[in-house]
Amino acid sequence: MIELLSIEFWIVVLFFLNFSLVMFLFLFVKKINRLNLGIQDTAHHDTKMDDGNHVHRSATDIIDLLEPLVKESRKAAISFDEQIKEKKRLLKELNDALDSRIISINLLLSRADALQKKLEEKQNQVNVSSALPSDLNLKSFSNSVIDEQNQIVEMYNKNFDIDDIAQRLSIPKGEVQLVIDLKKKFIAMERNGR
C-alpha cells in the first residue's frame, strides 16, 4: 500500500513538474516575442536586430533542449499510470479470489454445522430408543442376550476357557465370567432346591 501511494505521489510530482515546465516555456516564449516586437518596432540599429535574432535562436535552442525532457517526463507519467492501473487490477483480482474463498469456507462451515446437528439428533434418537426400547426392540434385545448366554454356557460345557469364549463371541471377559458364575449358582440352587 505504501508503494502504491509513493507511485501516486510521483505522478503528481511529475504532473506539477510538467505543468511548471510548460508554464516556464510559455512565459519564456512570450518574453521572446515581446523582445522581437520591441526590436522590430525600434529597428534603428542592426546590432539590436542581431541581438534579437540571437535571443530568438537561444530561445529555440532552449526549447529544443527542454522538449526531450518534457517527452520523457510524459512517458514516465504514462508508465506510472499503467503500473498503477495494473496494480489496482491485481488487487481487485486478489480481493475477488479472497471473497470467493471466504464464501466457500462459509458454505463448508454451514454444511458442517448442519451435518453436526443431524448427527446430534440421530444420537439423541438412538439414546432415547436405547433408554426406552419399544416392545419389538426389547424382545429382539432379550432374545439376542439369551442366545448369547446360551452360547457362552454351551462353549463352557465343551471345556472352552473364558478367554477363548470372550474372543470368539467378541464379548468382554467380565461378562463371560458373570454369565458362567450365574449359571453355576442357578444349577446349585436347583440341586439344593430338590
Image: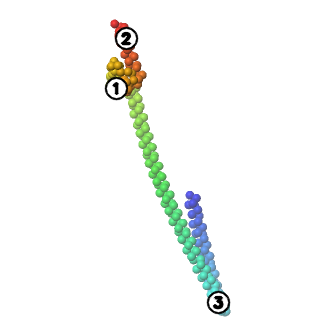
Residue assigned mark 1:
137
Question: The residue under label 2 is which amino acid type?
Answer: Ala
Q: Residues within 10 Å of mark 2 (few under 14, many from 20)?
A: few
Q: Is residue 53 above or below residue 74?
A: below
Q: Measured from the top left, where is residue 126 in percent x and y?
A: 39, 30
Residue at position x 64%, y 89% from top?
A: 50
Mark 1 or 2, nearer chain start: 1
The residue most toward the top is 194
Residue assigned mark 3:
50
* Residue 37 appears in the figure: no
Q: Disc 3 to disc 2, how far (Cα)?
A: 147 Å
Residue at position x 50%, y 57% from top?
A: 91
Mark whose residue sits in front, 1 or 2: 2
Residue assigned mark 2:
188
Q: Residues within 10 Å of mark 1 (few under 14, many from 20)?
A: few
Residue at position x 35%, y 19% from top?
A: 159
Regarding mark 1 in the picture, which secondary structure is present there? helix
Q: Disc 1 to disc 2, how far (Cα)?
A: 32 Å
The quarter of the image holding the N terminus is: bottom right
Dot label at residue 41: none
Question: The residue under label 3 is which amino acid type?
Answer: Asp
Question: The residue under label 1 is which amino acid type?
Answer: Asn
Q: Disc 3 to disc 1, how far (Cα)?
A: 124 Å
Q: Measured from the top left, where is residue 83 in percent x and y?
A: 52, 64
* Residue 165 appears in the figure: yes
Regarding mark 3 in the picture, which secondary structure is present there? helix
Mark 3 or 1, nearer chain start: 3
